[in-house]
Amino acid sequence: MSIVANSYRSKLRILLILYFFSEKVKEDERESMEHIRKFKSEVRIQKIDFLIRYPDYLSAELLWLIESNQIQEDSSIENIKNIIKKIFRENEPEIKRDDMLRYFYGAYEDIDDIISFLVSVGFIDFKSKRSVSGRVYEKEYYLTMLGINKIESDILTGIPKAIWYKERCELIGQYFGDLSGTELKVRQYQHEEYRNTPLNEYINGIQSEVISKFLRIFGEELD
């Protein structure tokens, strides 16, 4: 894939993450009338982005919900089973995987240019604080009405490739949407392959791990 196409895809993906995982800001709490929806923490962006870009890790997290008894209803367990079967049947861990580097705090990709672009076209606003040492922290992202209208009236209805991202964001939101960036990071570090990846090297997939767990839980092959 060309650099241009990859850049466009990344901008689309990050914008949709901000849209689907942000919360509406009450009118009396808005610093600006353009701050319609609010998303906190770059860490959370990075960790949600990782689950989108690595369908096998997402599958492993879904299996973990069953292993840890957080999902117990038969219908919900069957639904997760079918989701994972579909992911592997369509070979998503190979076709959809978009590699990320392991950084000091886990999977990471520099998104400063993406955020700057989304701000420049008026889709989002961005605020942060800076410590005495110059470190930027407490990053907050606000979707504007222009950005929301663009997503709802153009992107989700006029860009076929956006539908997969929409459905994947909704899936992640259904099962992991309440988790903070730190909580998602802790979960991802439970995987040995992820944890043991050297700094500044790409994180490998865990398809074999998912296949083994699927067989152990459901007693059938995942193919």
Image (spheres, rainbow, N blue to C red):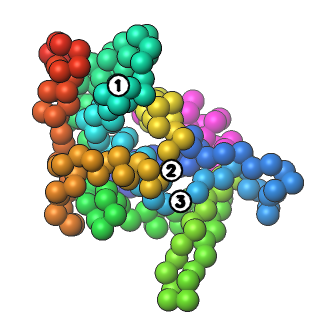
Residue stretch rendered in magenta on the structure? 146-162
Q: Mark 3 or 2, which is nearer the eye? A: 2
Position of the C terminus by quadrant: top left
Specify whether residue 155 is painted magenta: yes
Q: In the rendered view, would you say 64 is above or below 32? A: above
Earlier-in-chain disc, 1 versus 3: 3
User: Which residue does the numbered mark 3 point to in the structure image?
Assistant: 41
Earlier-in-chain disc, 1 versus 2: 1
- Distance (Cα) linking label 3 and label 2: 9 Å
User: Which residue does the numbered mark 1 point to in the structure image?
Assistant: 66
Q: Residue at x 56, y 49 (%)?
A: 18
Give x and y (percent) for residue 16.
52, 44
The outermost residue toward the front is 69
Q: Amino acid at mark 3?
A: Ser
Q: Amino acid at mark 1?
A: Ile
User: Which residue does the numbered mark 2 point to in the structure image?
Assistant: 180
